[in-house]
Amino acid sequence: MSVTDTELVEQANTAFYETMERGEFDKLSDLWLDDDISCIHPGWPVLTGRGEVLRSYALIMANTEYIQFFLTDVRVSVAGDTARVTCTENILSGGPAEDGGELGPLVGQLVVATNVFRRTPDGWKIWSHHGSPVLTETDDEEDENSPS
C-alpha cells in the first residue's frame, strides 16, 4: 500500500510538534528547508532565514521545561510540490523549575497555526510556520457583558 502525499505531509506536521515536545533541536532543524524560511510565533515579529527561525526554537526549548501539543481541526491541502496544514494547537506548557526543583506552573494556550511545506528529495520540509493566538473571553469580560 502506497502512502499518499497528504499522509506524508500529515506525518511531517506531526513530527514537527513531536520533536518540540521532546526538545530535540537537531531533529527539529532537519525538518525545515535550508533556504528561505519564515516563522511567526504568537506575539512575535516575523522571523526569516534559518538563523533567526531556528534561534527562536532554541530559545523556546531552553525556557520551556514541559510542552505538549494536542492538535485538533487538522486540515491538509497538497498542490504539486507545496502543501498547507491548518490546525488548532491546544498547548499545555510549564516553565523552568522553581526553587523547590519542581516544574513551574502549567499554562494552557490555544493557537491556530498554518504550516506550509515543500517537497524535497529528502521528503516534505517546513517552509513557513504561522501561529496566532485564539482570543477567549475572560471571567471579567463575561461579568461586564452579563445582565445585572
Image (cartoon, grey):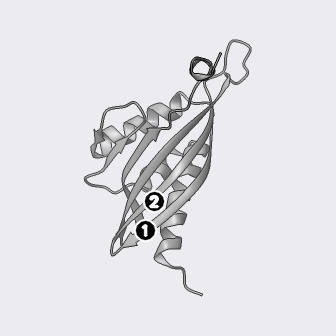
Instruction: Give amino acid for label 2.
Output: Val
Element class at badge 1: strand
With respect to residue 83, does 129 lie above or below? above
15 or 79: nearer the viewer: 79
Q: Residue at x 55, y 85 (%)?
A: 2
Element class at badge 2: strand
Residue at numbered disc 1 = 77
- Asked if residue 122 can be seen in this view, the reply is no
- Mark 2 touching mark 1, by CB under 8 A? yes
Quadrant assignment, res 115: bottom left
With respect to residue 79, does 39 lie above or below? above
Question: Looking at the picture, how far across and down is residue 7, in whole percent?
Answer: 53, 72
117 or 112: nearer the viewer: 112
Quadrant assignment, res 91: top right
Q: CA distance from mark 2 to mark 1?
A: 6 Å
Q: Residue at x 43, y 42 (%)?
A: 131
- The furthest residue to the top: 99
Q: Residues within 10 Å of mark 1 (few under 14, many from 20)?
A: some
142 or 8: nearer the viewer: 142
- Asked if residue 94 can be seen in this view, the reply is yes
Residue at numbered disc 2 = 85
Q: Residue at x 56, y 38 (%)?
A: 110
Of the two numbered discs 2 and 1 on the same chain, state the one appearing first in sequence: 1
